Amino acid sequence: MQRLLVSTHPLLLPPPLAAFSCRQIRRILPQSRTAKPPSFSVCNCSSNSSTFKVKTSSELRSTKASSSTDSQPDPKLTALRRLFSNPGIAIDAYIIPSHDAHQSEFIAECYMRRAYISGFTGSAGTAVVTKDKAALWTDGRYFLQAEKQLTSSWILMRAGNPGVPTTSQWLNDVLPPGGRVGIDPQFLFTSDAAEELKQVISYNNHELVYLYNSNLVDEIWKDNRPQPPNKPVRVHDLKYAGLDVSSKLSNLRTELAGAGSSAIVISMLDEIAWLLNLRGSDIPHSPVVYAYLIVEIDGAKLFIDDSKVTEEVSDHLKKAGVELRPYSSIISEIESLAAQGAALWLDTSSVNAAIVNAYKAACDRYGQNHEKKHKTRTQGFDGSNEQLDGPTTLHKCSPVSLAKAIKNEQELEGMKSCHLRDAAAICQFWDWLETEISNNRTLTEVDVSDKLLQFRSKQAGFLDTSFDTISGSGPNGAIIHYRPEPESCSIVDANKLFLLDSGAQYVDGTTDITRTVHFGEPTSRERECFTRVLQGHIALDQLVFPENTPGFVMDAFARSSLWKVGLDYRHGTGHGVGAALNVHEGPQSISYRYGNLTPLVNGMIVSNEPGYYEDHAFGIRIENLLYVRSAETPNRFGGIEYLGFEKLTYVPIQIKLLDLSLLSAAEIDWLNNYHSQVWEKVSRLLDGSARQWLWDNTRPIMQ
Amino acid sequence: MQRLLVSTHPLLLPPPLAAFSCRQIRRILPQSRTAKPPSFSVCNCSSNSSTFKVKTSSELRSTKASSSTDSQPDPKLTALRRLFSNPGIAIDAYIIPSHDAHQSEFIAECYMRRAYISGFTGSAGTAVVTKDKAALWTDGRYFLQAEKQLTSSWILMRAGNPGVPTTSQWLNDVLPPGGRVGIDPQFLFTSDAAEELKQVISYNNHELVYLYNSNLVDEIWKDNRPQPPNKPVRVHDLKYAGLDVSSKLSNLRTELAGAGSSAIVISMLDEIAWLLNLRGSDIPHSPVVYAYLIVEIDGAKLFIDDSKVTEEVSDHLKKAGVELRPYSSIISEIESLAAQGAALWLDTSSVNAAIVNAYKAACDRYGQNHEKKHKTRTQGFDGSNEQLDGPTTLHKCSPVSLAKAIKNEQELEGMKSCHLRDAAAICQFWDWLETEISNNRTLTEVDVSDKLLQFRSKQAGFLDTSFDTISGSGPNGAIIHYRPEPESCSIVDANKLFLLDSGAQYVDGTTDITRTVHFGEPTSRERECFTRVLQGHIALDQLVFPENTPGFVMDAFARSSLWKVGLDYRHGTGHGVGAALNVHEGPQSISYRYGNLTPLVNGMIVSNEPGYYEDHAFGIRIENLLYVRSAETPNRFGGIEYLGFEKLTYVPIQIKLLDLSLLSAAEIDWLNNYHSQVWEKVSRLLDGSARQWLWDNTRPIMQ
């Protein structure tokens, strides 16, 4: 599944490279990857309508000003704006990002404030509401979806397109100087994002107002708001985790000591789940639980709603010396740590502003009492191991992020095993679908997606999908993160390309695969595009590279064949994948966003998913998961290791869609070799017609 | 010719990416490109000896401390150290970089202070002398040369290798806290480099001491010091320049006005030569003249030794409104500009510290008189056009650098034309050399290089070589910037690989070409390595990429075939080349140094020169010059242009060195097509045996 690896607040000016934090608040979108027209537009389509018109920038100029008066006032916006003038609030604008308090990509429904207020349900986006305007920023994956879902009260901002302002530029533009811009620092903003926003809008004398005591969307979201999740947590078996909690905590403590810190606050839910070998069900697709974790040199505290903690989990945690605390007591614990003079490691790119501010304020109070000043260090230039004196914040990436990304042997085993079971389910599904289509059965994109879930759910260890299945026929395939809805989705058209991007959570691993197929006779245009996407896929798959090479160095290899004829795609090429955890994880990525210098390391997992999308026509994506391993080269120039990829995904790629005249002998060899491995690994999990389907679809191409 | 694109003071800590200025003082050398052993060593070889031994780090540990006492004291070092304790100096260390006052790569002999003091004649390096130690930093291109040339009084620091300190780290290491580190700010340090050095050594309480009134090497360099150059300047004909001086100045003034500056100081000699359509002979290989230029909104002043200015040049400059001033009056002019309240655009990454400090000091005096404070702006975030109030420094890349890099039609025409004449000379040379070798003639690397010069100098418009010819037989080919010396060079061995990297300055353009050949029977190892280097060369040559793509994105394509078997090379892949100007120019490059975000733009020239070097065995490099042009793709996804390369260099590549089994059909097509173009373009400039040689060496490979 394609994603922006970095979770996004498209709030700020394009930063200098150094401003990149490990979590990378913002994206760099080189203009080279962005379309010129249209740059931004007002949507005049009703929500979920399948017909819509894209307005160009020039059309827009005449309609923009009148957009919010032409149409019916939006009752949610009206209610929200009413709160702006409340005493103690008094703001001119309010920002509503997508995230929960933990910067999760997928979030529990009850926290989907941005989707509630705007109607746009894509996973990435930021809404900004002023007294007379409302605008929504999202990225290239979601332009078409946002056009469909936003009402005419909203201006769609195509983030990254030339001429499209960032949210802070826009605020500077539309607010009269001296405006007050409200945010919820407790649970919607990282500390870094809040600090940078504050600085940028200060250029126009606007003030950033932290509204500590109320989230304004919560104030108006009273009816039909879902309850917070409360399902029990489970222990992630050691045979899948590979390393027990005590060892993981001990490794982390070594890092803390090395950095001179006495404690670390972890707020990313997948980091907590990984570190404590726990899995939860609070969020669809992500087997995590809402919690915070503080690890000290001599202890650890998990902040969690105790109704979710079974006796087994409680024992498991106790064994590793982890105490339980109520979820809501995190702030007071932070304050108490400051009062004890703890030197805290805070990854301010992931920890929210409320926690960071609480710590700073408490440290300042501590400082006044002890005549010591609170200090802030970024990663020390000299790597010194000094014991920090008094409360000191170390702003540094959470070391758990990297430890989690480098899979151990058992984690890799689980990933390999679940990928084969997943492949078996997918082969059964394709066999079924091709038969149905050839029998002229009418099936919607949702029917198909439901059937895939049926096949998957029969596999051992299946738990959940790892994201909403993207099942897109014809033009819907061009909507990079299309999510078909029962009431509005299309019929799977036998004469158009069909793109299916899906994944599953198993007890032992996480999958993510995209295949694009045609049930009839593809056009030569479709075949050329598909072949070029496959050439990119093969080029990346085959790459060998020296250790310490960042992922962005590899990105262009996946695009080169498309570039040759002036084609490209507006998303990165690869993201990290968790082992029985989040389908998207960092810190590595393979992307044209050159800010992420994380090298690909032996044991990391990445997706390989180049694509091509022709708006309103078709979409193509071919995605396998890969893991990084030693390439065992005959030479080791520079005395270092050279690395390469090994595939996790074994599912046929449709031969019918190839233009063989474009493929080199080596590329045909790659494909034949891949299909031979697919047969070898997956056929034993299949029988009947699915096995025959696999046989038919893994036959070598004769050159 | 391979180079580090960025001129280098390897003085400082690896910077965060944002610290990169347009001139990029320092290099990022990812560890992945660097060898582990040996990391640094003491040379115990006499200067220019052709036998030497590399000491490993572990051997070094035992010899390092005693190195300077074991051997004869170096009389130059002794004389230099004597000055350390002079009243008014009182320093503990002195830094001697390679550059002249203009950050030139090649410099007039009289300014080669670092080579004089250390004996190491490579183009890049920094010497640091303390009261009891002397160390020289250079990069991977020069490790072997430095090992040969340094005496045992010197420690060789292999910059970028793991564990090798930067000069400032080393100073922090070896000096007792509170040391005084002297530099010559007038003519050896850019402002940025001096400021950063000051900051880093301050961590150990060392003080950076600006020795304004004397360069310590000049003090001891009395005998046999060459005179400063004083040859006349000439006008670069408009038919080659393509744009007259008034138009260039007018474009520059538009940029000044747009940035709110009233004047710019230009100190890069090639920028001055380009802007004023002048060429000089002050520096070997670079057709430039020692000068400074100040361009104001309503005037321009050239600071130059007036003995170099002919009447023709004087008229040419007068016509464009450029006044003449003595070279030495630059500082007083800067002070006078400050007193007039000028808002100065200073590229502090290229302008020396003396100028910047003089301006700041004068501005402060002006401020005191006018009760206004001097301000410094870096590039404004909002691109505003405010008129700056009072003296203000704008720290921003010189806009001349980019304007010069993007060649106009006439410049490209000149480059194309001189490359064909150059190719003719090179074909005559190869024909001659192959005949001589087959007749068992004994020729040294210098003989061969001299003969090449003879052939070239017969070509119309020939002026000079564009750098010292690298003529390396067998193991000498592995010394990336080898310069054969008559008294020590090798015989060209008929049974070894021979690498020849050379170039010329013509009246209409500049060339730079490398070919590697074998006169006998290459080994299979040599053929495999050569073929992989050629595959990298072809991959880069064929690349199509979207506009706004930085050069580093392309670098890995040139390495990928080597990486597959664990090989690599320790230099960048491409540098810019001036049009009848410096053979190395920025701001673009194609390199694994990811800090240079300059996109490749239509009209830019780059070299394409992957290589492979097996220490003490052989070197391989295949270099053509390319220019960037529209790729005229059938699609233009994103509404942007896709770019590709066109070759400037047309000289055969030796077929004998290929392992055809490694080449794809497309690669063989590329080679056949290239050779067919070589024949078509160059044969009409040849006759006799050279024409026959060209015919023989451009025959297609049958597949």
Image: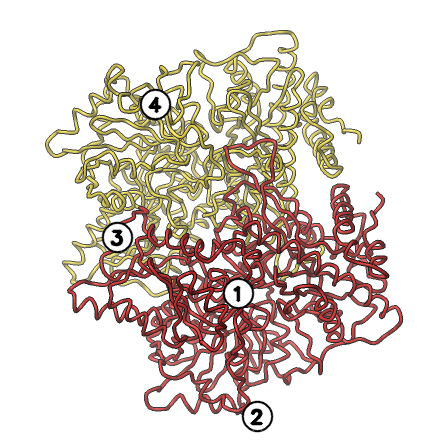
Chain colours: A red, B yellow
Q: Nearer the viewer, mark 2 or mark 3?
A: 3
Q: Nearer the viewer, mark 2 or mark 4?
A: 4
- Where disc 2 sits, the SS reads loop
User: What amino acid is labelled 2 in the image?
Assistant: Gln
Query: What distance separates the C-alpha of mark 2 from that of mark 1?
Result: 51 Å
The quarter of the picture where the N terminus of chain A appears is bottom right
Q: Are marks 2 and 4 on the same chain?
A: no
Q: Which mark is residue A103?
A: none
Query: What distance separates the C-alpha of mark 3 from that of mark 1?
Result: 35 Å
Q: Which mark is residue A235?
A: 1
Query: What distance separates the C-alpha of mark 3 from that of mark 4?
Result: 37 Å
Q: For the point 62% across and 68% down, which residue is it?
A: A467
Q: Estimate how packed mark 1 is, as few (under 14), some (14 to 19) or many (20 or more) residues with alpha carbons within 10 Å.
A: some
Choose the circle earlier in sequence order: 2 or 1: 2
User: What amino acid is labelled 1 in the image?
Assistant: Val
Q: Are marks 2 and 3 on the same chain?
A: yes
Chain at tag 2 = A
Q: For the point 37% across and 71% down, which residue is it?
A: A353
User: What amino acid is labelled 4 in the image?
Assistant: Val
Chain at tag 1 = A
Q: Which residue in the structure is indicated by mark 3? A: A387
Q: Which residue in the structure is indicated by mark 2? A: A72
Residue A450 x %, y %: 73, 74
- Where disc 1 sits, the SS reads strand
Q: Which residue in the structure is indicated by mark 4? A: B42
From this viewpoint, which residue is outermost toward the left? B87
